[in-house]
Amino acid sequence: MSGILTYALHYEGAFNKNSLGAVSEGAKLAKEIGGDAGVVVVGDPSELTDELCGTLGSYGATKVYRADAPEGLGAPVVDVMAKVIADEGYSYALFGGGLLGFEIGAGLTARLNAGVTMEVTEVHAQGGKLVAKRPILQDSAVVDVDYLGEPGVIIGRLNAFDVRESGDGAAEVVEVDVQLEEHSTRAKMVQRGEQRGADVNIEDADILVAGGRGLGKAEGFEMCETLAAAMGGAVAATRAVVDAGWYPYAAQIGQTGKTVAPKLYLAAGISGAIQHKVGMQGSENIVAINKDPNAPIFEFSDLGIVGDLNKIVPKLAEAVKEKKGG
Amino acid sequence: MAFANGDTPSRGTGGKVAPADFPPPVDSQGEFIKRELDDEDELIEVGVAIVGGGTAGLSCANRLLQLLADDPELTEELGEVPVAVVEKAKTCGAHNLSGAVMRPEPLERLFPDLKREDWRKEGFAFGEVDKEAVYLTPTSKRSIRIPPPPPFKNHGNEVISVSALARYQQRIAEEQGAYILTETAASQLIVEDGAVVGVRSGDKGRGKEGEELGNFEPGSDIKAKATVLAEGCWGHLTGPAIREFDLGRDREPQTWELGVKEVWKVEEPLDRVIHTIGPWPLSTSAKQGQVGGTWIYPMKDERTGDDLVSIGFVIDLEYADATTSCHDLLQTFKTHPLVKKILEGGERVAWGAKALPGGGYWSMPKLSMPGAVLTGDSGGMVDTVALKGVHHSINSGILAAEAIYKGLKEKSSDFSSYEDAIERSQTGKELYEVRNTRQPFSKGFFIGGPLVNLFIATKGKIPIRLPWHRQDEREMFIGNTKDKYPKPDGKYIFDKLSSVYISGNATRDDAPNHIRVQTDVPREVAETWAWMCPAGVYEIPDDAPEAGNVDVIVNYTNCVQCGAITAKGGRLTTPEGGDGPLYQNT
Amino acid sequence: MKICVLVKEVPDAAVEKRMDQSSMRISRSGERNLNPFDTHAIEAAMQVKEGGAVDVEEIVAVTMGPESAFRALHKAVSLGADRSIHLTDEGLAGSDVCATGYALAKVLEAESPELVLLGQQSDDGECYTIGAVVAEHLKMPSLTQVIKMDVADGKLTCERQAEYGYDTVELQLPAVISVGDAINEPRYPSLKAIMGAKKKPLDTKSAGDAGIESDRVGEGGSRTKVLAINPPPAKQAGEIIEDEDTAETVQKIVAWMDERKLLA
């Protein structure tokens, strides 16, 4: 057995970033342990065209297995991947995290009686096999996990894998004819992807501009929103200001609010007390603006600016807009 | 020897204000006493209701169930639930904190089959005191070792954690058949026809303004043949009970002290029990009224093999400088070379704060009323010179159980035999002996000190009664004690917020505010609260005026329920069950 | 209809969680509580029962755990479950997600519920997947992170927030649903319910009683192995800029972000 089989989620003509990251990672790992970098896509063939599926080749996929089955649900994909793994002999199944990644990965694990690691942040090849790294206990430790037997299932943390273009040509697209299990047909998608504007899901945002007490007043959030808009991100808030009614609870980060790990967390007027820190310490890049040079946040920020946020934030929003050419 | 009857506090004389001038909006008897039981089918009936699952309450439960085990007839009479313990924390022990070096006899009496090694195996004891040292700290750098004055002789005593002990006692009580109702607050005392007939449990699911939320669940009346108030320092129902039954008559007012504690994991085990009696970092002037001391105790955790150190700062809440902060004084104390030698290189693993009753013998209320008794700290049974209260809690719990058992057998609700039992016991005798040994400190360190020694040396035989004063009547001024405090660095010196975090405090974000204070108060009062509170509950907005009145922000979700605010002009009322800290080994 | 609710006893959120270096497992000392997400699952079961759309004969709480886990069951019962089942066995210790799901499925098989509910994640395992594993073993359709659930005529209509927005999915019963914490506000148990919990039936089962094959569970049945526990990657000390010329500072920030491809 060899090779890595990755699942790619599609919606309205595009594969999501998370999936592309997984495909890139799968391709990289397949090169290291040998075998194909296969990708499974499931949905309506009129949407999952040969052309679209072929583009996965530019992320390193060598073969794309396409199945005509309901999209957006986990069980049908389990059936498809189980078949492909059985027929083609893949050693590992890889997922980019996110809700479906977890559901399918878990179902596949049970189907194949495989070993599974979830919330994986890194994968290494070691002696022709893969070892997965994952954080545990709220990011306070990292474990190395080995798989006993094959296949192994790797479910990545959301956006953990970088999207990498390999410069290869279009991938080969192959039809998979699968007989769905009975229970896989007993869930039906009634409506998919409904947008509900009012709820901002800060957990999915790549960029967060977070405001705290240092903003001084509720109106201070206006400049956070301007900056967030310029950067293409969302706005978050600390518990203190949510309590004070300056911003809604849905945006709260911290011990009792949400936990986030965006690519960029920009904290304006936030001291960085531990109750807040635990909610965002997993962020890839942390930038902090605070007038107090002794604010705890400067101890764990990647870039700290000691200054008046009322001056800095608006100017920063403008500079970003200019840089992005908009 | 003549003592003036204390300074009569004058009010509002230029830059000095007393918190008592701004009493909290609370009607103690009106709110916390219920005058009629609910209908039979709505209420819950138990034999004995014990309010408070700390050392005193659980000792009472343990002893009572030992007696009932040999008395099936009475057990049956008490019904399905012979003994119920009502505890507001998530588990017994979660709200308990003490030094502590405990005199062993009462616990040995309670559990005669256990040896000291068993205590350590169970995880609540950490070693017998072998070496001890007492130091004077005249400056931030110097320390002078002095021969231990009698109250500080601890040889043979055991270092324990009351938090861990309560957990152990809870387990035993459950095995003995008690119903331990955790996450349940007792919000009202039920008094009918001049007798206590039970308590009412607190509501759950109220919002910030006290409104009923979607999952609102009202409390229930718990009817009991005997009620034990073991609420610890202050106690939410104890205060109203004392007023209702005039239990404070002819006694000195109660006074309080605040202790802030940390537990550290250290590389080098500490080999002795240490007490320091100042004066640094406190001021010696009587005007400042700063009276306090510290402890440093070694703890060998047999379960994990860790070497731990318990360190704490205790200050009498009598002080007058509004910027006095017990938490920050503890941090200041840690900068002394004596402490650095012990803690540096280690890791802080716990933090907590708790008020304790300091008035001693003269301030103890009458300990029984029809249908109920007061035990432990609720009854003010703490020797604050020697820092000894745990064994009194256990002892009073045992004696309460025995008096109640006797009363129940006689079908009486008169448990006054308990009062004599306390008076004649080790507890009564010890507290009587030291009854005058704290008051002189209000004259300042240098005048008070020798007087304290005199009273100690004469073992309390001088027949005099020294008075106490209400602490909230003390005029506050904004001084410069705060200039001493070191800056937090997150590794050795800690700020209040990160300390609250490791106390495991998990109070619901939209829980109702359980702290009653007037929020429009003079700056002196606001600063008193802001500095005093170890959890940073009280905050003065950045743009508040430097003089005159300010609007105090009350971040009540930080509250670790230490009780200090009640001594200095506010009132801690019954929080929602399940809220507050989760102390493990304090 | 019979509803089974899977519950778990986990360390209290406030207890510092540690890995036991010698056993390479999560240390199980300290305060333990019913997993907060599971309280939402019980509440969901209660709301189905009280909703009236279907007739619910009983709600059964099921847990797999060491001896102390009976407390989680008592809590579940005080919140409304009619009885509980405690699967406990030395041989189950060290079971991974796959083995745990299999073991629980065996117990559920014997109960034949129409609906299985559970909280979508547990505070300690951080796996978020038990529901899907159990469903696969039981050959039932399943959905996770459900924040709205309606029952009628043998089917469920559920809503959940997925990768692209909110999905509405219909499932035919029997089904396994993992609920998110946004689905409801759990009730508080009354004192009477808390005190009465001890009296409700609690069935203790060993692995053998449930028909669980011993080589598929426990450490021996695990299909992964923890090789090492490491501290988290140390964060490099960050750069600090003191703002004097704001225009200049802002350019520095933009350059810093650009370097890291944050301005794409």
Image: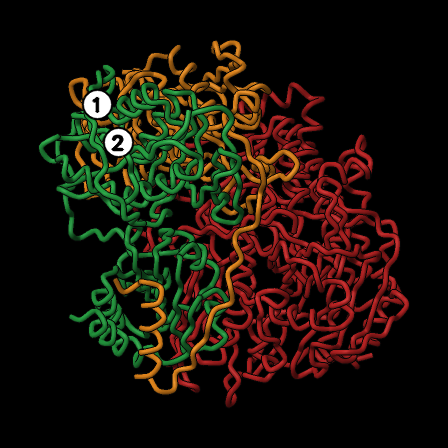
Front residue (pair B341, B12):
B341
| Residue at the bottom extreme of this rendering | B14
Q: Is residue C242 left or right of residue B172?
A: left
Q: Residue at x 59, y 84 (%)?
A: B480
Q: Where, quadrant-wise, is the N terminus of chain B in this rendering?
A: bottom right
Q: Which chain is orange?
A: C
Which residue does the numbered mark 2 point to in the structure image?
Answer: A40
Q: Residues within 10 Å of mark 1 (few under 14, many from 20)?
A: some
Give a yes or no on whether discs 1 and 2 share a subunit: yes
Label 1 residue SS? strand
Front residue (pair A216, B556):
A216
Which residue does the numbered mark 1 point to in the structure image?
Answer: A176
Label 2 residue SS? strand
Q: Is residue C197 visible?
A: yes
Q: Is residue B496 left or right of residue C22?
A: left
Image height of B229 relative to C205, above or below: below
Q: Residue at x 62, y 39 (%)?
A: C20
Q: Which chain is red?
A: B
Chain A tint in image: green
Front residue (pair B254, A294):
A294
Q: Earlier in the sequence, mark 1 or mark 2?
A: 2
Q: Amino acid at mark 2?
A: Val
Residue B236 percent coordinates (x, y): 52, 52
Image height of B476 relative to B241, above or below: below
Q: Amino acid at mark 1?
A: Val
